[in-house]
Amino acid sequence: MMKKVQVGLIGYGLSGKVFHAPVIQSVEGLELKTVVSSSPQKVHADYPSMEVVGSVEELCRDDQIDLVVVATPNTTHYPFAKQALLAGKHVVVEKPFVNSVAEGEELIELAESRKRLLSVYHNRRWDNDFLTLKQILHAGMLGEVHTYVSHYDRYRPGVRDRWREQTLPGSGVLYDLGSHLIDQALHLFGCPRTVWGDVFPQRPGARVDDYFHLVLGYDSGLRVHLNAGSIVKQTGPRFQVHGTKGSFFKYGLDPQEEALRQGKKPGSPGWGEDEERHYADVTVEAGKLTVRGKVETIPGAYQAYYEGIYHAIVEAQPVPVPAAEALHTIRVIEMAVKSSREGRVLRWE
């Protein structure tokens, strides 16, 4: 009989309701037992028999809970994760990991001392476009990569009254969308040698950054360009990657987020699949010829993250996203903010 891992979820806003609960419920071996929420009616509308408690303390006192998932605003990631680790729980933290390198280092040391697993939900490593690009790079189709460009653009010209747009630690688009783009780049290429950033509030009335452009430099000559903006009506390619043997262009967004918002779950028909019109364009050298063609998109699989968490807890397998890797993303964010403020390129320490 398959061992059950009991899960406690802190928070039932957008993150907990859309990105965590249904994905956890789709993974065999994981059982969502308890949710911490101030609005039990919202939880019971989706899961009528779910246990709902009003505090993190109450959740952490439950000896049946093996894994705690922190899916709350960024200001609470560090204290809630610390509280759960001190209670002897394994912990998954929604991205971004924490708001500072110092907080992340403390949590990693605490997890190691308590012999508990600590991981960060960088689910976009399992986006269908990123999985496809990763396979193409590993196959060497593009040769040595020299230019990597990744965009995450939105059209939201009006400033909204929500915590992500208030002057709080961890607010702004760099911590939000930037953490995805940075994590993907570091997952492919490792830590950079240099970081340059242009980070600022672009929209009238914006109180926190809603635009950024980062350039990560590598000794090989590779330059990674990461960009996000909030006033982009017509988006361009999601990825542009150029190497010594060819180029990769990919339009469109992975459909898993929209499917989750519609109430679908991993395992639904067509889960993570791409529209044919969004298949990647790849142009490569083939002898004396230049060949251009479409590459079918690998289906996205957010559930793979939580499958990895299950096997890490039950079988002592490596966690799918180690906290130490997520900490590198926070270091890049801190460096980018400093670079933008001081107007200079910074070297990785």
Image (tube, helix red, strand yellow):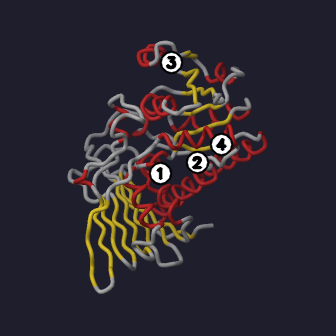
To which residue does mark 2 refer?
320
Residue at the spot of label 3: 38
Q: Position of residue 315 (x, y in %)?
A: 69, 41
**Up/down of 143 relative to 214, above or below:** below
Q: Amino acid at mark 1?
A: Arg
Give the distance between the C-alpha atoms of the residues marked 2 and 4, in whole angstroms: 8 Å
Q: Nearer the viewer, residue 23 or 234?
A: 23
Quarter that holds the N terminus: top right
Give the residue displayed 31% in from the left and 52% down from the top: 153
If you read the primary sequence from the N terminus, does the residue marked by circle 1 or circle 2 appear first?
1
Tell me whether the residue at label 2 lies in contact with that at label 4, contact meaning CB atoms closer than 8 angstroms. yes
Q: Nearer the viewer, mark 2 or mark 3?
A: 2
Residue 265 in the image: above or below residue 142: above
Decide: marks 1, 2 in contact (CB < 8 A)?
yes
Identify the residue shown where x is 58% and y is 21%.
33
Q: Residue at x 74, y 42 (%)?
A: 110
Amino acid tagged 4: Ala
Q: Nearer the viewer, mark 4 or mark 1?
A: 4
- Residue receiving disc 1: 125
For label 1, the crowd category at 10 Å Cα-Cα, with few meaning under 14, some 14 to 19 and many 20 or more, is many
Give how far apart the Cα atoms at labels 3 and 1 are.
Answer: 31 Å
Up the image or down, 114 lies above or below 288; here it is: above
Question: The disc labelled 2 sits on which kind of residue?
Answer: Pro
